[in-house]
Amino acid sequence: MLAPQVVPRPGEIAVGHFWNTQTQPALSAVPKDSDIAWQGWREGKLWFTTGHRGRDHLCGIAPFSLDVVDLENPHEMRPVEITTKHILYKSGSTVLQVDRISGESKRWALPVDSFIVRALASGLYATFPALGSNSPDKGGGLLKLNATDDSCDVLISSRRTPPVNLLDGRSKNTPQGMFEDRKGNVYFWWWDIPDRTVSPGLRSESQVYRWSSEGKEWEKVFSSVRGIRLKDERPGALIMTRGNPPDGLSMYGYARFEQIVLLNPETGKFELLLENPDAEQHPLKPPARWDFPPELCRILPNAVRFHEMAWYNGTLWVLAYDKKLGENNGSEYLLFAFVPGRKTAVQIPLRFTLSEEDQKWSKQRGANLDRPLLADNGLFATPQGLVITAQMSPGFWFLPYAEIPQLSQPAVAR
């Protein structure tokens, strides 16, 4: 029986640059037959860890040139962060910082075992969650690792009493992430769960607080009742807010995508970029910078978990999973480019393609990479093009801007 013919949609782009770290000759420096864990976009490269011979390597690939950096790991620790000068490793309660050139190292022993390390321009930080997986009432907080010695300062602790700032002592709160702007301000995002024995009418919120580089005091600058998704753009961030589930999808844990907000890294201000006309809450008041595309409204499930976003040089990119169209002709993705000078989006249907070798590799492992399930925060906008990562994938797709003819269309005045 012949396979059903794929009928391209008008303007469809076949994304054919799939760089498989296990089969691509140009990527021979990457350890083979290892588990890939994507770390994100840093210093002009897509970074990932590979489990190899009992130790995690940290590798970086420049998607345009395919230059590979393989930073072998001589330590019995897991690499968790990379900067221009350092690699950060973690094991238990210990953080190890290693200079990438000299090899000099420095250690910190933190007062908690479970934490996430973040390297920002203003220093090194560690967010720690609630104690115990089943103990949401024991809270979390934020540490800053001192550059001059091996100590750390407790900036926030929901277990600290008496509180020394407005974020201390909130026993049910759990940290979710942090980011920064170019002014040196640090932003801390956590899920605020009020004490309903004291305030029974209050609802839980995703809240973003700013720690001023001057006053060093926490200030709430953003909140959303149903939660958010955060894309750290280093510096700056994109925030996608959640609303009530689309009709008929509440049992599946979906949440409607309502707004996309930019933390402008230059100004330190939040800007509304896009708003779903069906939005029920408005963390930022309209008008939005761009019109919401009708095609994005009808895409099912029109939910947060099926939309990826990225920001580069004034352009917002949204990659949406188009289940309805996918059932018709096998092409399951729509890419929206919101560019400066246009009020409406440029729409680009996408179809992912594989070489014969990668098709064979994908079938052998049951990966189904011709219809990939996008990785969370798996879309990156780089100076040369878009990088797209997928779950359970040892490679990534690269779509050069030069191969998107729709971007050359005349701009529409706002």
Image (spheres, rainbow, N blue to C red):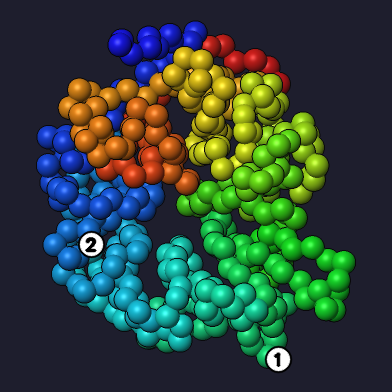
CA gap between label 1 and label 2 equals 41 Å
The amino acid type found where label 2 is placed reads Asp
- Identify which residue, 74 or 296, lies in the foreground: 296
The amino acid type found where label 1 is placed reads Pro
Q: Residue 283 at what x, y percent from top left?
A: 76, 49
Q: Mark 1 sits on what residue?
A: 162
Q: Mark 2 sits on what residue?
A: 56
- Tell me the residue at 21%/36% (across/down): 364
- Tell me the residue at 34%/33% (across/down): 368
- Tell me the residue at 25%/68% (across/down): 99
From the image, state whether disc 1 or disc 2 is nearer to you: 2
- Residue furthest to the front in view is 1
Secondary structure beneath dot 1 equals: loop
Mark 2 is surrounded, within 10 Å at the Cα level, by few (under 14), some (14 to 19) or many (20 or more) other residues, namely many
Determine whether 367 is above or below 70 in the image: above
Q: Is residue 303 visible?
A: yes
Please report contact status of discs 1 and 2: CB closer than 8 Å, yes or no.
no
Q: Locate residue 93 relative to residue 314 in the image: left or right.
A: left
Q: Quadrant of residue 71?
A: bottom left
Q: In which quarter of the image is residue 303?
A: top right
- Identify which residue, 63 or 279, lies in the foreground: 279
Q: Locate residue 119 relative to residue 248 in the image: left or right.
A: left
First of labels 1, 2 by sequence position: 2
Q: How many marks?
A: 2
- Tell me the residue at 39%/29% (across/down): 371
Determine whether 348 is above or below 220 in the image: above
Q: Residue 168 at what x, y percent from top left?
A: 67, 81
Secondary structure beneath dot 2 equals: strand
- Identify which residue, 99 or 291, lies in the foreground: 291
